[in-house]
Amino acid sequence: MGLSEVAIIGGGIAASVLALALKECGIASTIYEARPDGAVDEGTITLTPNSLRILDALGLYESIRGEGGNFEEVTLVNPQWQKLGQMKMGSVEFFGYEAIRLPRQVLRGIALRKAAKNGVKVHYEHRFSSIIENGEDGRARITFTNGTTASADFVAGADGFFSAVRKEIFPDAAPPEYMGHLNLSGRVERKELDIPEEELQCPCSSFGPDSFFAFMPTKDSTKVNYLSSFNFADLGKEGWKEMSVQPAEHKRLMEEHFCRDPWPQWLQTALRKLPDDEIRSWPYYVLPFLSTYISPTGKVALIGDAAHGQPLAAACGKRANLFLGQPPTGAQGANSAIEDARSLALVLSRSTSAENQLELLKRWDNHRRQRMEKVVSNTLKNTAMLKRTYGPWMQVAREWMMWGVFTYFMPEDSGLQWLYGYRWESVLED
């Protein structure tokens, strides 16, 4: 006999996509979100073809495609904004879809509304406390900090980077690790960037001698998002909280790292004009790999950031509450969470008994961990460039090497068919 009900802990993107996918498979689910109704997810995400294919199949693509900036390639430039090459993040020709850069809250809101319309119940202000995986009736029994309880045949932990479910199931798992660099981001009026459109080449990114800067498109063509990274000492949890509410310090750091050579004068001028209170900051963290995403009984599985938080950024404080995002060198956090959710729904829909369910989950677990190890490895390889400081001659040599690679050796699909061409159905084909 298959599953009849799944409890989903967390109310973010992974949770809402899982609920929709389960509904499509004929399995009921309930979402339990720790935050109150109306809570806003800060920041922007880039959706790439591997997740857009899933969102399209679930009926979400047409609702989101006009809500952000659509693009196929990111142009890599040097700090003087001279083109070195281009890297595909989407392609109708090669992958079926363009990439979309949009606010995280937009996707979450659209997906949650569709889930609710399809009959999925969402309980807010239900913060996970504990779980008994095999209750008296053989179902998992969940307790929340507000004193309420719930039961289900299966539990999905989709409660984010600092997952309470992960801590309950794997109490000895290593905590998140600081990666050694800080991000500053926000939005700027396009008219403040005194550079022609064909020279800006947005979306674009640049690795300086000891820092990174990028511009990404938005739904509003009169504005562009910017994001930047540079080496920075760990301030600890309380220190990061304090920094998150110090806009003047954000502005000072922005000017210290980017309002100087070798960055172009037009960029320096625009950054000096930025309002202090519109610059967000967060430190990059990475979650060490877990040996498995499923509990020994096969009653609980972790998905999204709860399972494999890729190099993530976390800032605490009243301005951001808890803001999570991924470095621009990876941009696969939300996409991987969507892959997890859809592939898990497929596996659960094929379950016919407890033994069969555990066997299928082990296949899913092995499949997803192998893929995530490759995704995260690729991301860490790129972000490693942020940790190095290059002298003038080394910087020139690096730029020439990158230009050569992009000009003479880069395949038409940027060698990323394995990433953007992923088929979630393959979880049961291995």
Image (tube, rainbow, N blue to C red):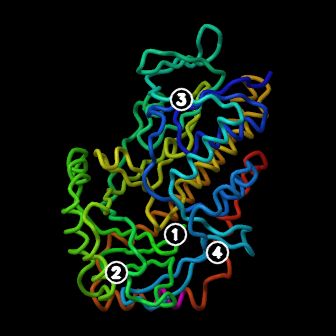
Amino acid type at mark 1: Asp
Q: Where is residue 103 in the image (x, y as percent from the top left)?
A: 50, 57
* Vertical arrangement, residue 61 with respect to residue 359, above or below: below
Quarter of the figure with residue 397:
bottom left
Q: Are marks 4 and 1 in contact (CB under 8 Å)?
A: no
Amino acid type at mark 3: Tyr
Q: Residue 119 lies in magenta, yes or no?
A: no
Q: Residue 403 lies in magenta, yes or no?
A: yes
Horizontal relation, residue 195 to residue 272: left or right: right
Q: Between disc 2 and disc 4, whose residue precedes?
A: 2
Mark 1 — residue?
220
Q: Between disc 2 and disc 3, whose residue precedes?
A: 3
- Can you tell which mark lies on residue 415? 4
Cα distance, mark 2 to mark 4? 24 Å
Tell me, yes or no, if residue 305 can be seen here. Answer: yes
**Magenta stretch: dominant secondary structure:** helix
Residue depth check, mark 2 versus mark 3: number of the one nearer the observer: 3
Residue at position x 43%, y 15% in the image: 147
The secondary structure type at the circle numbered 2 is: loop
Residue at position x 52%, y 62% in the image: 331
Mark 3 — residue?
32
Q: Are marks 1 and 3 in contact (CB under 8 Å)?
A: no
